[in-house]
Image (cartoon, rainbow, N blue to C red):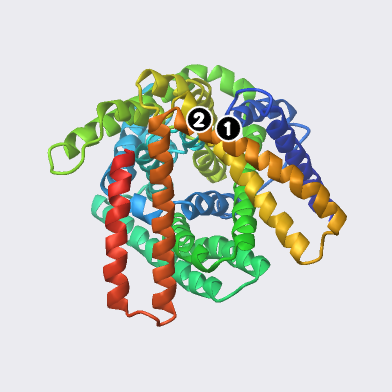
Amino acid sequence: MNEFLQTETIIIELLVVASLVAIVIQRIRLPYTVALVLVGLGLSFFQGMITIELTEELILALFLPPLLFEAAFHVEVKELRQNLSPILMLAIFGVIISTFVVGGLVAWGTSLTLSTALIFGALIAATDPVAVVAMFRALGAPKKLTTIIEGESLFNDGSAVVIFNIILGAALTGEFSLAEGLFEFVEVSLGGLLIGLSLGWLTAQIIRRVDNYLAETTLTAALAFGTFLIAEHFHVSGVLAVVAAGILNGNIGPEGMSPTTKIVLFNFWEYLAFLANSLIFLLIGLEIDLNAMVSNMGFIIMAYIAVTVARAISVYGLNSLAALFPGEKIPLRWQHVQVWGGLRGAVSLALALGLPVSLGADRGLIINLAFGVVFMMMLFQATTMEWLVTRLGILKKDKKEVEYDHIRGQLLAIRAAQDELEDMHNSGQLSAHAWSVLQPEYETASDEVTQELRELVENDPALETKEINSARHQLLITQRGALHALERDGLISSDAFEHLASQIDEQLDHLSDKGH
């Protein structure tokens, strides 16, 4: 019991630290993951005072599902399908190239054997561009580029973990067959995807028939963690199972959700991912031997260079190969961003934390190398990404577009408040006196912001076109949703739905092309 209370106390302390970090970074221009790396490094000074023991199975089962499910839940299938070829090339072949290039260079430049260095190569192959994607969305980088980088990260998490487990097993047993390894890769990957798609579809069907935001949110939590455990029980990829379940559930489940459920659900998963991300970075700090890290700084710098070189070989090499075949090519400027934006983060650190103690002293060195590489990437690459995309001329938004988004967001928030105020008044929750005070205030605020937005749009034809196209896009989405509801209720046939929906999809594609 005392041991349990001690562990609980440590977790509470880590949560307080994570909260303080989140509060502090609001005042400084620093990505949250970068701040976590710095704080995690600082926690290494308290190693002797704070001890917490987690098994490798528990670490992966606790931390990976929320990180993967939250990211997968927000992926749009249409965007993913349009960019699937470059995503899968990097997620599969890019991971294999990175694993062996990094493993070979690290074995050559450190005290690790080739088999052990390949373990490091596999766990560090998974990209985690959380800070980069958040910055892309804020600054208005092309959606296609954002989708490719985020989609690659999702699927290479799965392929990296599968390869990691194969190589780890070979290193521990001393036995490896290339044919058996390839067969296991395909079997484990397809098995995980099949379980994830099946459970994701089943859960989505239940959610569509339930109108209880607490129950629906709980079902998604059970899906994320349960899918991982079931897949691992059948010795297939729990990571790919969670990714598949998250993508399917995120695209089908919300169709029948109420606005309240969507808000609660999105906030819940955003918080859970924040929690998992924070605890991984802080726990790795408690595993780091700072003295060993300093003494191994040469190895860490070499490992960082190896990971960066491997990333460049993967991105430029695979994109050059893809250019030989028909299809849309990835611009060279985007490839530069793909290389520099291939950060490593929570997934790599979770795999490092979960390494078995039977690896002996090599385990400590791999953990130090993993943290060191993540630290250097966050310090050098995450903080300079905005400069790079600006220098390359990739950002789409100018100052007026940013101002437009700000004013439009302000107006939409005020209008939402007005609707809520109206509902409160009509339902009797608000007295006539309070209504007479609040309604004019919000009416005045709405008029002022509307006028401000009108003047901005009228003075910039490009913004006017963007606003009209955005409205058309939203109206087409609404039309498609209405058709789906009519088909579901039996008011129109499936053939009619498919015909009308395909016409709307063509218009959406046309608008998307004009937007890019």
Q: Position of residue 234 (x, y in %)?
A: 45, 67
In the image, 36: left or right of 330?
A: right
- Quarter of the image with the C terminus is top left
Question: Percent x, y for residue 93?
Answer: 28, 43
Q: Residue at x 38, y 32 (%)?
A: 462
Foreground: 165 or 346? 346
**Which residue, given by chain and number where applicable, does mark 1 sit on?**
452
Does residue 322 appear left or right of residue 134 in this picture?
A: left
Decide if residue 165 is in sight here: no
Q: Which residue is mark 2?
A: 456
Marking on residue 61: none
| Nearer to me, 98 or 359 | 98
Relative to 160, say whether 384 is above or below. above
Residue depicted at 37% across the width and 26% down the height:
308
Q: Identify the image quadrant of the N terminus.
A: bottom right
Q: Residue furthest bottom?
A: 490
Front position in the image: 252 or 373? 252
Q: Which residue type carries mark 1? A: Glu
Q: Is residue 455 above or below residue 226?
A: above
Task: Give the image quarter of residue 284.
Answer: top right
Q: Is residue 42 visible?
A: yes
Q: Distance of mark 2 from mark 1, alpha carbons? A: 6 Å
Q: Secondary structure at mark 1?
A: helix
Q: Are marks 2 and 1 in contact (CB under 8 Å)?
A: yes
Q: Quadrant of residue 34?
A: top right
Residue 78 image point, x, y percent: 35, 54
Badge 2 density bin: few <14, some 14–19, many ≥20, Cα 10 Å: some
Residue type, mark 2 in image: Leu
